[in-house]
């Protein structure tokens, strides 16, 4: 009597790919203070919505293996039309009397600018169960969102 062959076990790498297929990195919502309009030589505070600055997860289970994928935001690269900056963390809005922001940009020229925030997530995975690999790094992945900002110049006149 011949027994039927046991079906091949799904490789953990394939389960990782399944988890990645269901993984979603939402685009950030860039914010500025002042909002929608700023001025030459005035620091413009930059931030992304803090509710979006959190780890993201996805999971896939096959053949007694469960892969959990986690993406953790690391930094925000800001493209600001005439320049750019990189901020570690989401940034904070301007608060009167509050501490200065570690995430700000000072425009040198008036104009209408596209402001793009690109959040970079470091993505790792962990497998539990009958896995042929316990964990690994999947890489660093960006997701972007944009808004517009008008920058004006204030003219002053002095008299003696």
Image (spheres, helix red, strand yellow):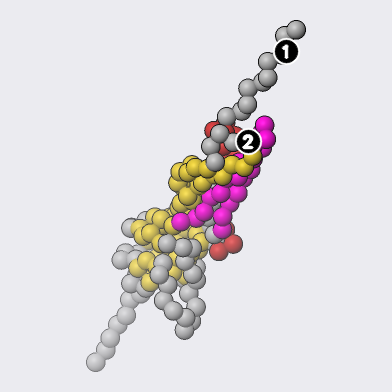
Residue 22 visible (yes or no): no
**In the displayed structure, would residue 124 be above or below residue 8?**
below
Residue linked to disc 2: 130
Give x and y (percent) for residue 111: 37, 61
Element assignment for label 2: loop
- Residue 79 colored in magenta in the image: no
**What kind of element bears circle 1?**
loop
Q: Residue at x 71, y 13 (%)?
A: 4
Instruction: Say whether disc 1 or disc 2 marks the residue closer to the N-terminus.
Output: 1
- Say left or right for 93 vs 62: left
138 w.r.t. 121: above or below: above
Disc 2 crowd rating (10 Å Cα; few below 14, some 14-19, many 20+) is some
- Name the quadrant of the N terminus: top right
Task: Specify the principal SS of the magenta part.
Answer: strand
Q: How crowded is mark 1: few (under 14 residues within 10 Å), some or many (20 or more)?
A: few
* Nearer to us: label 1 or label 2: 1
**Residue position for label 1:** 3
Instruction: Choose between 123 and 49: the one closer to the eye.
Output: 123
Q: Nearer the viewer, residue 90 or 29?
A: 90
Range drawn in magenta: 54-74
């Amino acid at each position: 009597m011949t027994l039927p062959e046991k079906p091949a076990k799904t490789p953990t790498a394939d389960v990782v790919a399944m988890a990645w297929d269901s993984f979603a990195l939402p685009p950030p919502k860039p914010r500025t203070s002042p909002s929608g309009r700023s001025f030459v030589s005035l620091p413009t505070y930059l931030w992304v919505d803090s509710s979006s600055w959190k780890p993201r997860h996805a999971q896939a289970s096959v053949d007694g293996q469960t892969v959990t994928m986690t993406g953790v935001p690391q930094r925000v690269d800001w493209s600001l039309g005439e320049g750019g900056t990189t901020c570690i963390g989401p940034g904070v809005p301007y608060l009167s009397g509050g501490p200065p922001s570690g995430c700000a940009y000072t425009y040198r020229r008036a104009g209408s600018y596209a402001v793009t925030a690109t959040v970079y997530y470091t993505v790792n995975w962990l497998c539990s169960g009958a896995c042929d690999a316990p964990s690994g790094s999947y890489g660093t992945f960006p997701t972007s969102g944009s808004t517009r900002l008008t920058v004006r110049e204030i003219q002053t006149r002095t008299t003696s």
